[in-house]
Image: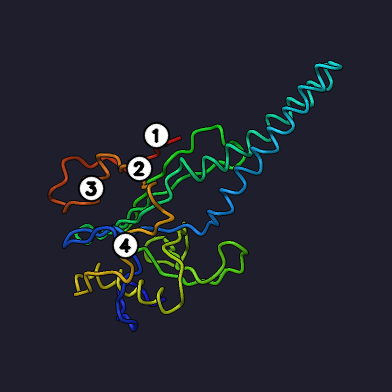
Amino acid sequence: MPDNNQPQLAPPQLIWLNTKNSIWMEIPRYEGVMWGGVLFMIFFFAAIFIFIFIDSISMLIDDFDYVTFSIMLFYYLMLGSFAFLFYKLYFIIPRDQPIRLNKQRQAIYTFNYKRKWWNPWAKWPTTIKDFNWADVHGEMRFSSDRYTGGFQLFASVCQPGTLNVVERFQIASGSPAQLQQLWSYLCLYMKGELVPDEAVNKGRPDFWCPRKADKWPAEMERESTTEPDAELSAPRAYNELSDKTS
C-alpha cells in the first residue's frame, strides 16, 4: 500500500466506524469466526459430556473400580474444557477489538484479546498498545484459510526510518477495493485532510451484539482521546489488563 505520508490513489471510505471527531477516531475490528459453528460445538460437547456422565454413573454403580473412575474423570475434564472454551468464545469474550487513531498525537492504539486456547479456564488478558503513526505501513494480503480467508489489511510497525518490521496487526478484511479505500481514509484523516463522515456500514453487525470491548484504562482513554497539551501525566508504554469478563 502507499506509505501513509504519500498521495493516496483510492477515494477514502470507511467500512465501519465507531467514533470520529477532529482529534481522534475509533474503528471496530471484526474477527473472522463462524459463530454458528461455535454455538454448534457448545451443544455438541455438552451433549457428549452428559451422555458419558449418565452412562458412566450407571456403569460404576454396577461395578465400581478406580481405573474406570480415573478414565471417566479424564473424559469429564476434557469434554468440559472443550464445552467451556466454545461457551466462553460465544457468550463471554467481547468480539470488538477496536483501533483508535489520534490525529493530534499522530499515534495509533490497538485493543487486543490474548486468547489461551490450551487453557480456557484461565483469565484471558487484554493487551493495549500504542505506536507512532509515522512507523506504520499498510500491507494487503490474501489468505486461503478455510474460515478467515480472503483479503486482509495489516498494519506493519517498523523501526523508525527503516522497513524492519517489529510487529503486525490486522486492521480489517474485505475486498481489495474496500481495503484500499480504508487505508486511504486512515492516511488522509491522520494528515488532517477532508474525509467522509459516514462509513459504508452503519452501527454494528447483529452477530457482534451485545459483546462490546472492555473499557479502555483511564490513562489510555485520556491519552487516546485528547490533544498532547491536555495530557495530565505521561508514564506509559503499553498496558496489560485482566479480562474482567472472563
Q: Is residue 51 left or right of residue 93?
A: right
Q: Amino acid at mark 2?
A: Asp
Residue 222: x and y, percent? Answer: 21, 45
Q: Nearer the viewer, residue 31 or 40?
A: 40
Res. 154 image quadrant: bottom left
Tag 4 or tag 3, which sits nearer the N-term? 4
Residue wearing tag 3 = 223
What is the quadrant of the N terminus in the image?
bottom left
- Spatial CA distance of label 2 from label 4 is 24 Å
Label 4, on which residue? Answer: 133
Nearest to viewer (mark 3 / mark 4): 3
Question: Marks 1 and 4, Cα distance to the nearest angstrom?
Answer: 29 Å
Residue shown at the point (66%, 40%) measured from the top left = 45
Relative depth, front residue between 90 and 4: 90
The residue singled out by tag 2 in the image is 214
Q: Mark 3 vs mark 2: which is more N-terminal?
A: 2
Q: Is residue 139 above or below residue 97?
A: below
Cβ–Cβ under 8 Å for marks 1 and 2:
yes
- What element does badge 4 sit on? helix
According to the picture, the residue beneath numbered tag 1 turns out to be 244
Front disc: 2 or 4: 2
Inspect the image, locate mark 4, and give the three-letter code of the amino acid beneath it: Trp
Query: Residue 137 vs residue 146: left or right?
Result: left
Q: Earlier in the sequence, mark 1 or mark 2?
A: 2
Q: List x then y, in percent, for residue 246.
A: 46, 35
Dot 1: element: loop
